[in-house]
Amino acid sequence: MTKYILIIAVLFQSCLLPKKLDKFFDKKPVLAAQKCAEKFPIKETIDTVIVVDSATLQAYEMEFVYLYSMLDSLLGHQVSDSVKREIVTVFQEKKVPVIKYKYITRTVENTAKYQVLIDSCQNLTSQNMAKIDKISKEKELYLTQYINEKAKAEKYKKQRNINFWWIVLLLVFIFRKPILKIITKHIKR
């Protein structure tokens, strides 16, 4: 008997409860860090954001419009149409330089937070599914009760109708002589 008690005591002594686990990891922080790094690696992402300087772009466009109108007025009547078209096409082919600012953002994510969120979402989902199952079972129960009550009502309705006709037949049978007198009176007239 003492052997079994000793074996059970050893089995319970070797169990790692959360408090024991905390104490163990407090004593060995390097091992805790390694386990955490293996379980929840850090994911690094790099995002690139490009910002266009719209004020400078508008200033360039306004300058080009001004130069275009000035060129058009200068060329007015003094140059042939083919030369005008050539100058305008060269002028239109020029591209407006756009000043862009490029920002590179480096983000480091802690996957442990996401794992906790995923676990809590799964927990809430399972709780909600349990509630939905409970509600659907209650709905089925109420539905079967409703169907049973409706069947009983139909049964009583049929029985009531049968009893009504029996009463009508009995009344006709009981009062057959006065009814026949009334009918014969009306027929003779």
Image (cartoon, rainbow, N blue to C red):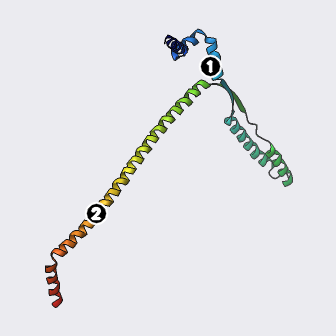
Type of the residue with mark 2 = Gln
Q: Residue 99: x and y, percent?
A: 73, 33
Task: Single out the mark in the foreground, 2 or 1.
Answer: 2
Is any atom of residue 168 visible in this view? yes
x 57%, y 11%: residue: 24
Query: For mark 1, does the 10 Å Cα neighbourhood hold few (<14), some (14 to 19), or many (20 or more) residues?
Result: few
Type of the residue with mark 1 = Cys
Residue 80 vs 59, above or below: the answer is below
Q: Quarter of the image holding residue 50?
A: top right
Tag 2 residue? 159
Q: Residue 139: x and y, percent?
A: 41, 46
Query: Label 2, label 1: how many angstroms apart (C-alpha)?
Result: 76 Å
Give 22 or 144, whichever is nearer the viewer.
Answer: 144
Residue 147 vs 57, above or below: the answer is below
Of the two numbered discs 2 and 1 on the same chain, state the one appearing first in sequence. Answer: 1
Q: Quarter of the image holding residue 152?
A: bottom left
Give 60 or 95, whichever is nearer the viewer.
Answer: 95
x 52%, y 30%: residue: 120
Pointer 2 with pointer 1, Cβ within 8 A: no
Q: Residue 143: x and y, percent?
A: 39, 50
Query: For mark 2, does the 10 Å Cα neighbourhood hold few (<14), some (14 to 19), or many (20 or more) residues?
Result: few
x 38%, y 48%: residue: 142
Q: Which mark is residue 82?
A: none
Helix, strand or loop at label 1? It is helix
Give 148 or 76, whichever is nearer the viewer.
Answer: 148
Tag 1 residue? 36
Residue 53 vs 11, above or below: the answer is below
